[in-house]
Amino acid sequence: MFAIRPDDLTDPQTRALLALHLSGMHDHSPPDAVFALDLSSLQSPDIRLWSAWDGEHIAGVGALRLLDAERGEIKSMRTHPDYLRQGVGTALLLHVIDAAQANGLKHLSLETGRGTAFGPALALYRRHGFVDGGPFGAYRVNGFSQFLHLRL
């Protein structure tokens, strides 16, 4: 079982995993379709970030951006390579969904990419009820991004 806790982005393991996430998004996405947030953007007051831990080792991260009183966006979901296919993504996703509901949100959305690198994430989201839909917020159709939504 993983311990999930709020993260203030000061732990070097959290920073390293988020750097890996950002690098991966740049490696697998066209330059104009990278919407992953850097550390300073993740410190915005409208974002809450959690990390999952296995003892002293980070297993994953996930964030919730509050878009308005009823809508939120899932951001920065990433499992550490040492913990792939061990339930980290599911644990974090369920935690973020619970936090969204506790905040009174009615709708969660996310943007992700296309291709093999995004397949496991898409399967995770769809397994938990997210459905394809159109862009939201400031996102626009760009030929690479996919938008998924979940009514809470």
Image (tube, rainbow, N blue to C red):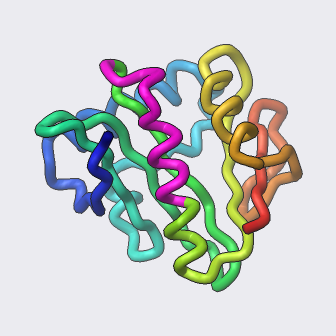
Vertical placement of residue 99 versus 14, above or below = below
Which residue appears at 69% of the width and 32% of the height?
122
Residue farthest front in this picture: 1
- Say whether residue 107 is left or right of residue 132: left
Vertical placement of residue 141 versus 101, above or below = above
Closest to the observer, 38 or 18: 18
Which residue appears at 33% of the width and 64% of the height?
43
* Labels in figure, total: 0
- Say whether residue 137 is left or right of residue 34: right
Residue 15 horizontal/vertical position (percent): 24, 42
- Region of the chain picked out in magenta, as a range: 82-96
Closest to the observer, 92 or 132: 92
- Say whether residue 9 is left or right of residue 118: left
Vertical placement of residue 35 versus 106, above or below = above
Residue 38 horizontal/vertical position (percent): 39, 48
Magenta highlight: main SS: helix
Q: Does the magenta stretch include residue 87?
A: yes
Residue farthest top in this picture: 116
Residue 111 horizontal/vertical position (percent): 68, 46
Q: Quadrant of the C terminus?
A: bottom right
Q: Quadrant of residue 69?
A: bottom right
Closest to the observer, 137 or 92: 92
Residue 106 horizontal/vertical position (percent): 72, 75
Q: Quadrant of the N terminus?
A: top left
Which residue appears at 23% of the width and 55% of the height?
9
Q: Does the magenta stretch include residue 119?
A: no
